[in-house]
């Protein structure tokens, strides 16, 4: 009898020794009579359990983790291949609370399947969304996406259906679908996990987008720091071409769609959509003036969809199961699900796909288990390096775009970076300004010059030099950057500074720091 064993090939598992675990399982199995079929799956998103090894048994896929190569002989001795007891055993994956309390729609196959296998993708419902989209036709597909309530998961939360309709209504010789896979926000990894764990769902989502708006070419703009995602995506794209899921006559229809991956060179500003388009055109990543919007004049001057990985990867399930099914998750104007990423000083870091409405408290304590240091959590930075610091007194805030705006925060791409009570919030404010100074594209003065002056002003405050005068100056500088910057980098970099000043004023009045 052959037993299937899963060892993740996701970058988080690889960084923790998954390849060595896989090799040791194969070597150990070779010395015994039991035949083992090793499958390299994506991750289930429970990073603190990686490498999480799963064994296919009659009772389902039984999980063991975190497994090191040194644990493997002991696991064999305990007969883990039959799902037997062991100190590292967590039982069937679906019974692990961190996993079974989620609403896995976009990430339904991530960790379940072999990411490079189109057959596995098809066996788990793949390409049903595109088939339905082809039946509906372009206009009704756009309507379905609009009705689902999907808003861009890249950060700005703009309604995806509205963007698609604008592109659909343009007359042009060529239209494009571009996928923003730059994922520059601190503490975020949802795009990477999706691309490494289920690349075909992104390919399908982009193909549906192309069909819906009349675009025949697509580009995935991927950050160069994601080599595993690059290899997985390029392998999946080659398979899709070979099997007739990309190119011409897709699924026997008249649909044509070409797709390729382009690597960015590693600049935060290249995640901003107009900079990304410049970079895709082979130019320096610098922000464009708007209007015109990319939907009207985008890549090479043609109408272009720019969507985040998660937005596009959510489209197949919306088409397959219908707008109403998707819309019924969530709250208010935040409909569907969002992958929250727990990072920083947290005990159980990882990815949680949940319906909107879950509170920060539940995420940090029920899922995350509190801080890794065991000390009280003092603040959480949500929405990347431009997001506000949220104090513990606001942890009852639900994950909802409007509720976050109501407390002056951003949900962004769903990253939460956790800090315990030893954090110095004046230093964190300085870091935000320094980040902006380093990453500014330099096109406008408030951001290019303002961020450098901001660092100098915070330094003076931290040294105790005329603190009240410099605090007033810092407030004024933040206001100028928010009002006068051309794009979100300079326009939002003051948010973490302002939130630190508001919620943690005592950290700015200590003085005496170098
Ligand atoms: C400085 C800056 C960096 C950004 N970085 C990213 C990024 O890494 N990935 C992303 O999807 N969107 C990023 N965005 C948002 C994009 O400009 C754009 O709103 C998004 O790609 C649109 O896709 P969506 O509607 O699916 O979210 C960034 C915006 C700004 C201002
Ligand atoms: S705000 Fe900063 S990053 Fe944005 S256009 Fe101005 S200089 Fe460039």
Image: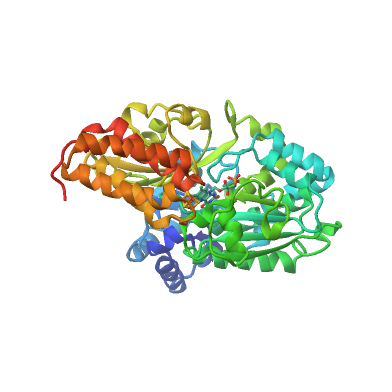
- Give the x, y percent position of residue 278: 59, 60
Which residue: 49% across, 41% down? 412
Left or right side of 184 for 253 = right
Q: Nearer the viewer, residue 344 or 508?
A: 508
Residue 284 x %, y %: 54, 64
Way the structure is coloured = rainbow
Q: Residue 339 vs residue 333: left or right? A: left
- Is 33 rendered above or below residue 509? below
Depicted 346 relative to depicted 236: above or below:
above
Give coordinates of residue 189: x percent, y percent. 47, 52
| Most foreground residue, 200 or 98 | 200
Instruction: Classify residue 221 as left or right of residue 439.
Output: right
The image quarter in which residue 374 lies: top left
The quarter in which the N terminus is drawn is: bottom right
Q: Farthest residue toward the left?
A: 512
The answer to whether residue 368 is visible is: no
Residue 108 lies, in percent from the top left, at 59, 46
Front-lying residue, 347 or 99: 347
User: From where the camera sits, is residue 303 visible?
Assistant: yes
Residue at 69% across, 61% down: 300
Task: Please name the residue shown 60% across and 65% down the image.
Answer: 262
- 83 sits to left or right of 250: left
Residue 251 sits in which quadrant?
bottom right
What is the tally of numbered marks visible in this picture? 0
Of 74 and 500, the residue lying toward us: 500
């Amino acid at each position: 009898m052959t037993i299937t064993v899963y060892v993740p090939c996701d970058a988080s598992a690889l960084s923790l020794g998954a390849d060595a675990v896989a090799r040791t399982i194969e070597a150990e199995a070779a010395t015994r009579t039991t035949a083992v079929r090793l499958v390299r799956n994506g991750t289930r998103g429970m990073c603190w359990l990686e490498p999480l090894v799963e064994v296919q048994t009659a009772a389902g896929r039984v999980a063991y983790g975190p497994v090191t190569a040194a644990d493997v002989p002991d696991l064999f001795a305990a007969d883990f291949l039959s799902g037997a007891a062991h100190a590292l055993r967590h039982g069937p994956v679906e019974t692990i609370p961190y996993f079974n309390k989620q609403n896995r729609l976009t990430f339904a196959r991530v960790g379940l399947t072999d990411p490079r296998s189109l057959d596995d993708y098809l066996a788990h419902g793949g390409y049903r969304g595109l088939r339905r989209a082809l039946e509906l036709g372009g206009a009704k597909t756009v309507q379905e996406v609009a009705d689902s309530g999907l808003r861009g998961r890249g950060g700005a939360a703009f309604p995806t259906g509205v963007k698609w309709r604008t592109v659909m209504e343009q007359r042009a010789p060529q239209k494009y679908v571009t996928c923003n896979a730059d994922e520059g926000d601190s503490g975020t990894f949802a795009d990477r996990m999706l691309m490494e764990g289920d690349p075909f769902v992104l390919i399908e989502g982009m193909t549906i987008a192309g069909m819906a708006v009349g675009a025949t070419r697509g580009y995935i703009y991927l950050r160069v720091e994601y080599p595993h995602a690059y290899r997985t995506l390029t392998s999946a794209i080659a398979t899709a071409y070979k099997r007739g899921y990309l190119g011409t006559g897709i699924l026997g229809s008249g649909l044509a769609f070409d797709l390729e991956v382009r690597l960015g060179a590693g600049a935060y500003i290249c995640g901003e959509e107009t900079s990304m388009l410049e970079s895709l055109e082979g130019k320096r990543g610098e922000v464009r003036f708007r209007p015109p919007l990319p939907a009207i004049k985008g890549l090479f001057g043609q109408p272009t969809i720019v969507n985040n990985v998660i937005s596009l990867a959510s489209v197949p399930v919306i088409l397959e199961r219908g707008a109403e099914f998707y819309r019924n998750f969530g709250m208010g104007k935040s409909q569907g699900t969002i992958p929250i990423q727990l990072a920083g000083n947290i005990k159980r870091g990882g990815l949680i796909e949940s319906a909107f409405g879950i509170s920060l408290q539940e995420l940090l304590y029920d899922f995350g288990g509190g801080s890794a240091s065991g000390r009280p959590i003092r603040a959480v930075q949500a929405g990347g390096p431009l997001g506000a610091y949220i104090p513990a007194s606001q942890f009852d805030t639900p994950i909802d775009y409007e509720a976050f705006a109501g407390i002056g925060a951003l949900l962004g791409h769903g990253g939460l970076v956790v800090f315990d009570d030893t954090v110095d919030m004046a230093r964190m404010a300085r870091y935000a300004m320094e980040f902006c100074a380093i990453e500014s594209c330099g096109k406008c003065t408030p951001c290019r010059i303002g961020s450098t002056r901001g660092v100098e002003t915070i330094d003076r405050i931290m040294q105790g030099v005329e603190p009240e005068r410099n605090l007033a100056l810092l407030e004024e500088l933040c206001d100028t950057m928010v009002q006068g910057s051309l794009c979100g980098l300079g326009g939002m970099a003051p948010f973490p500074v302002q939130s630190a000043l508001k919620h943690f004023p005592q950290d700015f009045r200590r003085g005496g720091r170098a």
